[in-house]
Amino acid sequence: MSAVDELVERLCPDGVEYRALGDIADYVRGVTYSKNQEQVDGPILVLRANNISLASNTLNFDSVKSVSADVRVRSDQMLRADDILISAASGSRDHVGKVAFIDKDLPYCFGGFMAVVRVRSSLEPRFLFHLLTGHSFAIYLEHTLSTTTINNLSSSIMKAFKIPVPPLEVQREIVRILDQFTQLEAELEAELEARRLQYGHYRDELLLRASAGTPHLQLGELGRIVTGRTPKGSDATAWGGCVPFITPTDIKNGMKTVIRTARYLSATGVEGMARVMIPPRSLLVTCIGADMGKTVINAEGCATNQQINTIIPSAMWDVDYGFHVLTAMRARIRGLGERAAGTMPILNKGDFSRIEVSVPTLDVQRDAAAKLDQFDALVNDLTVGLPAEIAARRQQYEHYRDRLLTFKERAA
């Protein structure tokens, strides 16, 4: 029996009280602003869904948005120590519910598609953070969001989530154990990020040399551009389907080739999606929300939803070279999408097809791609090196987290 089990047995032998989140925490939605209030060097800094790293549930400061001083920001919309920042709405359901813990007051507010969970009493904030990264919250979101086509964590949904509230002594011991796992993972992630920065510098230098003196062509001239669409509900299934149906959820950071997917098209679905079917070895590029600009190559014929633009490359563009070029261009692609009307970044087929890239000879493309593939594997291949170690630590953390946070509910 572990120390936590002994504590639970001693302090709550009849089980643990479960309470609605709304009874013990506030849920505060973020700042809303219009497109014309965005400024390059605006005085108000706004964090959005892309500022939460999905894999590690940590905060990052990539592409922070700034807005003008006339945007109204309430005091409770500024980030405070012990806040749990959460993605409340997104074009990708995979990002709804992802969280990051705020360990100190920060001079940032958070956007309208975001929220914070702010504990009032009876709960350690880090205990709630670990709960919100866990299996029970994921299942709750899957159930509640499956009834709507809008990926939105409303106040009523969040406040109704029931959580165990063991004695603070139990909460603190669980936090101590789980934080040891997350600290080790954070150290490994920092080392991996340093290597990725080195790789990114090498990749950009190599692509720059390869493109010197070469013609520039639009993506639409390098292949056929296809934007996917969503099939009828009855035409997609989690098993027994004929053709993989790819969504941004299936595309993870660092992934080069997508092999597995959560859904497949039935025979009637394949027929209905015939005009947007994608052959193997095409370039799939996410085109909406926090996922925008992630690029992957499909291993087999597939279909995609409307959140993905696909390039079916012509003979003049090597698909592996194209993957590295588009990966290097992710920030630029996202910037183009953020210029669109509305607050949700989106890049339509027309604007996507007009993006220009340099096109060296095929021999140069293939040589560059072969060199980059070797380096890419060192920082992204989940079967070797640091990525494999981080994946193992993450799996270990998730096992202990879900075990330690599972309690028998005390009878009313």
Image: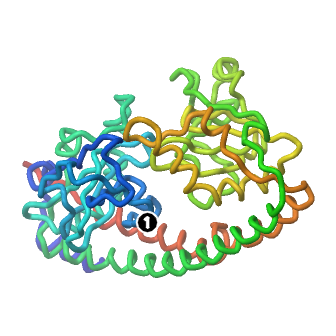
Q: Where does the image place residue 377, in percent across and percent down from the top left?
A: 71, 69
Mark 1 element type = loop
Res. 83 in view: yes
Q: Where does the image place residue 29, in percent across and percent down from the top left?
A: 21, 47
Q: Residue at x 76, y 38 (%)?
A: 312
Residue 312 sits above or below residue 198 on the image: above
In-front residue for pair 271/49: 49
In-front residue for pair 295/334: 334
The residue type indicated by label 1 comes to Ser
Q: Residue at x 64, y 25 (%)?
A: 266
Res. 406 in view: no
Q: Quadrant of residue 229?
A: top right
Q: How many neighbours does mark 1 have within 10 angstroms: few (below 14), some (14-19), or many (20 or more)?
A: some
- The residue beneath circle 1 is 56
Q: Where does the image place residue 76, in percent across and percent down from the top left?
A: 13, 56
- Residue 397 placement, left or right of 411: right
Residue 187 sits above or below residue 320 on the image: below
Q: Residue at x 92, y 59 (%)?
A: 363
Q: Where does the image place residue 224, in percent across and percent down from the top left?
A: 76, 33
Q: Residue at x 55, y 56 (%)?
A: 331
